[in-house]
Image (cartoon, rainbow, N blue to C red):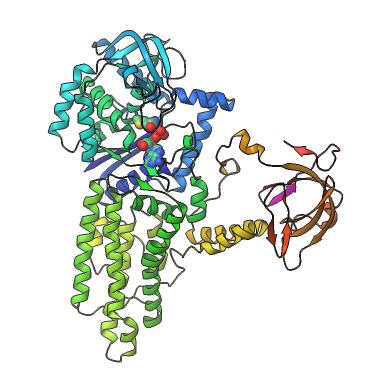
């Protein structure tokens, strides 16, 4: 069976964040599962580049839009790479292959009378890239509950798409295809919205030039939503490409709830007008909110850098957390504390521990060799029955676009496996001279259970089979989804390894303690902590320098809170028993301050005495190795090098840096 799945194409006006990553990870898990079932999968993602907001953001950044989007698109690709996203194609709407299809469609719709020229007078919300009539505005602002921002009055010559003509046909399609818009709550919303009456849609703009030109009237650019939706077929080579013939219509368009309206109205009507079959399903998942209930979004400034998170916890744990946390049809909550808690309980305790315990027992009780099993008893039968139910349940949940539900099923099996260990108590069987055959059966069943878990986890955490492969000593064990309900696959006699824990516990106490007391050492330990996690996760690549994540935007007022000063180093000495720390006495105007700085590996005390350097003077004092440090020296670092910032001109100590 063929299976075509898409994510929305993302606006490259800012870097991807965990909210935007969710859809891509969920689509990836669905695509991976279908591939493992032997389906012919095509998985598409990409970027939506012709938006007015891109022009604005690029202008603010002082670069041309092309350069701007190229930079951000690179970050999207890098993030998908780190997260092991297995997309078959990545479409950019600035690519010629897309532009020509949009122009072809616009032309065709115009020629058949579905697009006509008139004048638009109304409002436009640039952040949402949406037209609004005056009566829809709330307090003269954007009525989208997630936006509420200023709208602009537009009065310009425009082309319009006769949406109204297709209203009844669309409603009929939605009614006769209950799965077309999912979940049901969004379907009901959409039916209400369409029944409220569709107006013809303005589909071109003349007040800016960034975008795809209307082929027969090039002072107009195509409205970004019409342009963007077409990506789902332009990437396949519509109208006559081989992939188009093979994969269209899509089985699923996956997206967040905010953009279901565009996919349930503009898109199907465009397809109807072109006489093309409609996709089978438009699925709108919830949003990731922060603990205060606000949507995680770049414009709200509440986004934690996804590159940093992956570096800290690894790609599989981040994937697991996001997929597990967003309950079907609801919003999910994101906080780093919840993330750590979930990783420790589900991955380290439940799954990781089961794997470690089992492998350690095979090493201890059978010299690392998978034993020959004897007859199954009731407990084995129960476990096997559950594995079949779980495999089927997880599969059904994924068909319904519910990765959290699927993972819940899989974790039922994880718990049962742990219970099986406790109930069979292999350590007692090992002591019993009559227990050898039973012990062999139990150990064999346990190794098989790990294999099955590797298969079940593979769509969600593609790194797991990789890790297990080396421990179970055999390849190709985790590729076939159907084998999650088949037993007796691993050959007795296979040599296995105990290995390192696949999901080590995350001990944030190191992190937290250090945070409260000690700045330089915190950095040091944080580094070690990250390093540890990195080695354990194995497959995290180093970020290239330009991809070291930027911190979130701050206002000039926030910047002005930092009191940066020129100081002169009067004294410097090494801190006892701390390889990385120097204690400095610095002159700040009339004041002398003590600073402890983690630069001892780069500077001797003598290098610094007499130097004028930059101090963050209003940093809360912190105790380091018992010494109170009253500020922090600034330095640049890259690739193992570090240089303290200093001045080339003579400036008095105490001079402000701003
Ligand atoms: N460019 C349009 C989509 C065009 S598709 C033909 C767009 N882009 S977007 O970058 O703003 O958003 C892309 C997707 O990310 C949307 O599905 C949106 O719901 C999702 N998310 C953005 N923030 C999110 C959360 N905090 N949580 C979950 N999904 C979120 O819209």
Going 19% across and 20% down the picture, which residue do you hit? 166
- Image location of residue 540, percent across then percent down: 50, 53
Going 28% across and 30% down the picture, which residue do you hit? 261
- Image location of residue 349, percent across then percent down: 39, 67
Residue 38 in view: no
- Image location of residue 508, percent across then percent down: 52, 61
Ligand 1 quadrant in view:
top left
Please tell me whether residue 264 is drawn above or below residue 334 in the rendered image: above
Q: In the image, is 215 to the left or to the right of 387?
A: right
Tell whether position 643 is magenta.
Answer: yes
Q: Can you name the residue that lies furthest to the front here?
A: 139
Please tell me whether residue 623 is drawn above or below residue 283 in the rendered image: below
Please tell me whether residue 280 is drawn above or below residue 167 in the rendered image: below
Going 72% across and 59% down the picture, which residue do you hit? 628
Q: Quadrant of residue 419?
A: bottom left
Q: Give the magenta part as a residue range.
A: 634-651
Going 34% across and 56% down the picture, which residue do you hit? 458
Q: Give the camera-side residue of 454 and 72.
A: 72
- Image location of residue 581, percent across then percent down: 73, 60
Q: Give the camera-side residue of 520 and 392.
A: 520
Q: Can you name the residue that lies furthest to the bottom here?
A: 433
Tell whether position 638 is magenta.
Answer: yes
Question: Where the C terminus falls, by quadrant?
Answer: top right
Q: Quadrant of residue 157?
A: top left
Q: Give the camera-side residue of 640 and 181.
A: 181
Q: Quadrant of residue 294?
A: top left
Q: In the image, is 641 to the left or to the right of 76?
A: right
Question: Where the N terminus falls, by quadrant?
Answer: top left
Residue 173 in view: yes
């Amino acid at each position: 069976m063929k299976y075509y799945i898409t994510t929305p194409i993302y606006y490259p006006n800012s870097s991807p964040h965990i909210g935007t990553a969710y859809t891509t990870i969920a689509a990836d898990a669905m695509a991976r599962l279908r591939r493992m079932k032997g389906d012919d999968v095509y998985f598409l993602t990409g970027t939506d580049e012709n938006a007015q907001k891109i022009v604005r953001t690029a202008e603010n950044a002082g670069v041309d839009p092309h350069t701007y989007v190229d930079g951000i698109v690179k970050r999207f690709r890098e993030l998908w790479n780190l997260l092991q996203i297995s997309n078959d194609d990545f479409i950019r709407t600035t690519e010629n292959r897309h532009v020509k299809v949009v122009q072809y469609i616009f032309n065709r719709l115009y020629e058949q009378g579905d697009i006509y020229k008139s004048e638009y007078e109304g409002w436009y919300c640039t952040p949402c890239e949406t037209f609004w009539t005056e009566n829809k505005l709330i307090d003269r602002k954007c009525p989208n509950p997630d936006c509420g921002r200023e709208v602009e009055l537009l009065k310009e010559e425009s082309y319009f798409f006769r949406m109204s003509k297709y209203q009844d046909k669309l409603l009929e399609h939605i009614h006769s295809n209950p799965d077309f818009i999912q979940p049901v709550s969004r379907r009901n919303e959409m039916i209400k919205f369409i029944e409220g009456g569709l107006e013809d849609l303005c589909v071109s703009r003349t007040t800016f030039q960034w975008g795809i030109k209307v082929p027969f009237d090039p002072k107009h650019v195509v409205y970004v939503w019409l342009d963007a939706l077409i990506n789902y077929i332009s990437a396949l080579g519509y109208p006559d490409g081989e992939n188009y013939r093979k994969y269209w219509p899509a089985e699923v368009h996956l997206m967040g709830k905010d953009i279901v309206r565009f996919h349930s109205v503009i898109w199907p009507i465009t397809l109807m007008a072109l006489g093309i079959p409609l996709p089978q399903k438009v699925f709108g998942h919830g949003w990731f909110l922060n603990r205060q209930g606000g949507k995680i979004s770049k414009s709200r400034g509440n986004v934690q850098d996804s590159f940093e998170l992956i570096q800290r916890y690894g790609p599989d744990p981040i994937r697991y957390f996001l997929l597990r946390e967003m309950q079907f049809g609801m919003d999910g909550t994101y906080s780093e504390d919840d993330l750590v808690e979930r990783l420790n309980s589900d991955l380290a305790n439940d799954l990781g521990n089961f794997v470690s315990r089992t492998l350690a027992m095979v090493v201890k009780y059978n010299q690392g060799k998978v034993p020959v099993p004897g007859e199954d008893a009731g407990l084995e039968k129960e476990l096997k029955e559950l594995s079949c139910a779980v495999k089927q349940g997880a599969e059904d949940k994924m068909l319904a676009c519910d990765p959290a539900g699927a993972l819940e099923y899989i974790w039922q099996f994880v718990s049962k496996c742990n219970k099986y260990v406790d109930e069979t108590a292999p350590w007692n069987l090992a002591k019993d001279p009559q227990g050898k055959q039973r012990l062999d059966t139990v150990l064999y069943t346990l190794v098989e259970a790990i294999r099955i878990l590797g298969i079940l986890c593979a769509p969600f955490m593609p790194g797991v089979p990789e890790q297990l492969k080396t421990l179970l000593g055999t390849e190709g064990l985790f590729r076939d989804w159907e084998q999650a309900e088949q037993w007796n696959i691993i050959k007795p006699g296979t040599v296995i390894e105990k290995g390192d824990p696949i999901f080590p516990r995350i001990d944030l106490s190191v992190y937290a303690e250090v945070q409260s007391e000690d700045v330089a050492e915190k950095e040091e330990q944080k580094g070690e902590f990250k390093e540890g996690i990195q080695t354990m996760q194995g497959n995290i690549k180093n970020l290239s320098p330009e991809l070291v994540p930027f911190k979130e935007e701050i206002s000039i007022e926030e910047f002005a809170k930092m009191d940066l000063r020129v100081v002169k180093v009067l004294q410097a000495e090494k801190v006892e028993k701390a390889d990385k720390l120097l204690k400095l006495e610095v002159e700040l105007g009339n004041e002398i301050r003590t600073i402890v700085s983690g630069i001892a590996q780069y500077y001797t005390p003598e290098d610094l005495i007499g130097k004028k350097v930059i101090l963050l003077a209003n940093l809360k004092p912190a105790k380091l190795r018992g010494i109170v440090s009253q500020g922090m020296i600034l330095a640049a670092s890259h690739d193992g090098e570090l240089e303290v910032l200093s001045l080339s001109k003579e400036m008095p100590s105490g001079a402000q840096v701003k």
